[in-house]
């Protein structure tokens, strides 16, 4: 097998494409022949030693992937050789093969292609857990999605629309705003032309008839957090999803008091570990929605696995719409 090996987590340039012995699965594991792997923001942080999970060195990055089960280990009953699966295991995806815990593999129904599957679990699980579980989103409510043209943003738009909500999508270019409209957003805000803080807040106010959004989905953080929170409606729920902008913001807590608003943390990874039955139910519902055509990953482009460094550079340019997927 071949894989991108991180022996020194100082950044993307230190990754090397190496030939490695193809491992055999141990108890509870499967060997997956990887057909596609998506690039997520944590995949950048982990090779820079900035992610909250720090795997022992050396490791193969690539948190999310899809492929075919090539071998099964002792005790694995739910998967078989030749079965198509998707997996989000945190590492191992940027290669031709990897060992995956069988418990983390999602069997793929017929018609669920590897590219879509490799771009599915993280963004839809995060967005469903955020909107439907943590925010308890109801039909008729209004959701403001920040960073709306990215992976989790596009998933959030689709889930919110499927739940019967009105969606305002905020993105950095007119092209990204058009993408958001094409997948269901009711209104868009280009926050490059509607600058922070006042023009952005005025645009949110106009899009919500002065009421403010009921739910704000924020995977961006940074300088957007405070003006967005100041725009929230009464009893609003502000979802802290991530910090793609870099800096972790500080918010004046009197804003929560004045708005009767909730600041709600979203950590899908720990939810999946602590509440496995609820997570399994959620994933089954998401697979059903995919089959019904309610949700479908937005794929920016596919690139050969050997072009991983170029894919990282593309992601860093902030030009990505939806998800980047590497294919073998």
Image (cartoon, rainbow, N blue to C red):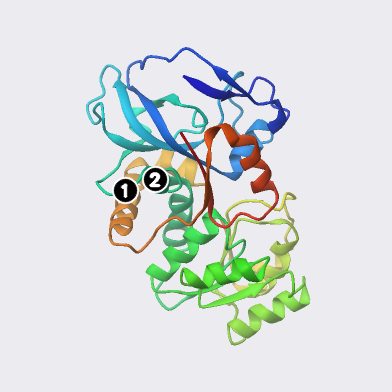
Residue 65 position (above or below residue 153) = above
> Circle 1 is placed at which residue position?
112
Q: Quadrant of residue 87?
A: top left
Can you give x and y, in whole percent of width and height, for residue 139 in the image?
39, 75
Q: Is residue 139 left or right of residue 157?
A: left
Q: Going from the N terminus, do you reach mark 2 or mark 1 first?
A: 1
- Which label sits on residue 266? none
Rendering coords of residue 234 (x, y %): 57, 77
Q: Which residue: 71% across, 77% down?
A: 201
Against 199, residue 170 (above or below) is above
Residue 114: name its quadrant: top left
Q: Between residues 68 and 252, which one lies in front from this camera angle?
A: 68
- Look at the numbered disc 2 and give the secondary structure of its residue: helix
Name the residue located 24 percent from the left edge and 46 percent from the top edge: 110
Q: Give the residue furthest to the top.
A: 21
Q: Residues within 10 Å of mark 2 (few under 14, many from 20)?
A: many
Image quarter of residue 82:
top left
Tag 1 secondary structure = loop
Residue to which mark 2 is pinned: 117
* Residue 93 image point, x, y percent: 49, 32
Q: Is residue 136 visible?
A: no
| Left or right of residue 236: residue 250 | right
| Mark 2 in CB contact with mark 1 (< 8 angstroms) | yes
Give the total of numbered labels. 2
Q: Is residue 122 above or below residue 212?
A: above
In front of the other: 310 or 89:
310
Point 61% across, 42% down: residue:
311
Q: Using a 10 Å C-alpha cutoff, classify the residue at mark 1 as few (fewer than 14 neighbours), some (14 to 19) or many (20 or more).
A: some
Q: Residue at x 57, y 19 (%)?
A: 18
Mark 2 to mark 1 CA distance (whole Å): 7 Å
Q: Does residue 98 appear to the left or right of 105 in the view shown?
A: right
Q: Position of residue 162 (x, y in %)?
A: 38, 68
């Amino acid at each position: 097998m071949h894989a991108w090996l991180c022996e020194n987590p100082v950044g993307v340039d230190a990754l090397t494409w190496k030939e490695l012995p193809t491992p055999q699965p141990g108890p509870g594991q499967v060997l997956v022949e990887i057909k596609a792997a998506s690039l997520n923001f944590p995949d950048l942080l982990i090779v820079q030693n900035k992610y909250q999970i720090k795997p022992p060195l050396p490791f193969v990055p690539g948190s999310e992937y899809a492929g075919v089960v090539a071998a099964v280990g002792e005790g694995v009953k739910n998967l078989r050789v030749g079965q198509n699966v998707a997996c989000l295991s945190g590492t191992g995806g940027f290669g031709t093969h990897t060992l995956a815990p069988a418990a983390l593999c999602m069997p793929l129904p017929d018609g669920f292609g590897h590219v879509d599957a490799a771009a599915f679990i993280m963004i839809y699980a995060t967005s469903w857990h955020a909107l439907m579980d943590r925010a308890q989103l109801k039909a008729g409510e209004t959701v403001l999605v920040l960073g709306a043209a990215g992976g989790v943003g596009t998933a959030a738009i689709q889930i919110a629309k499927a739940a019967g909500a009105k969606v305002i999508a905020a993105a950095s270019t007119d092209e990204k705003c058009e993408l958001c409209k094409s997948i269901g957003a009711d209104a868009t805000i280009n926050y490059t032309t509607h600058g922070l803080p006042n023009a952005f807040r005025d645009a949110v106010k106009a899009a919500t008839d002065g009421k403010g959004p009921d739910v704000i989905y924020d995977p961006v953080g940074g300088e957007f957090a405070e003006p967005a929170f100041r725009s929230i409606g009464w009893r609003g729920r502000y979802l802290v999803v991530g910090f793609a902008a870099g800096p972790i913001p500080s918010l004046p807590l009197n804003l929560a008091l004045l708005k009767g608003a909730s600041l709600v943390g979203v950590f899908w990874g720990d939810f999946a570990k602590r509440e496995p039955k609820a997570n399994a139910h959620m994933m089954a519902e998401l697979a059903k929605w995919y089959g019904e055509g309610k949700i479908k990953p937005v794929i920016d482009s596919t690139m050969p696995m050997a072009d991983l460094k170029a894919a990282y550079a593309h992601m860093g340019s902030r030009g990505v719409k939806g998800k980047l997927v590497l294919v073998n």
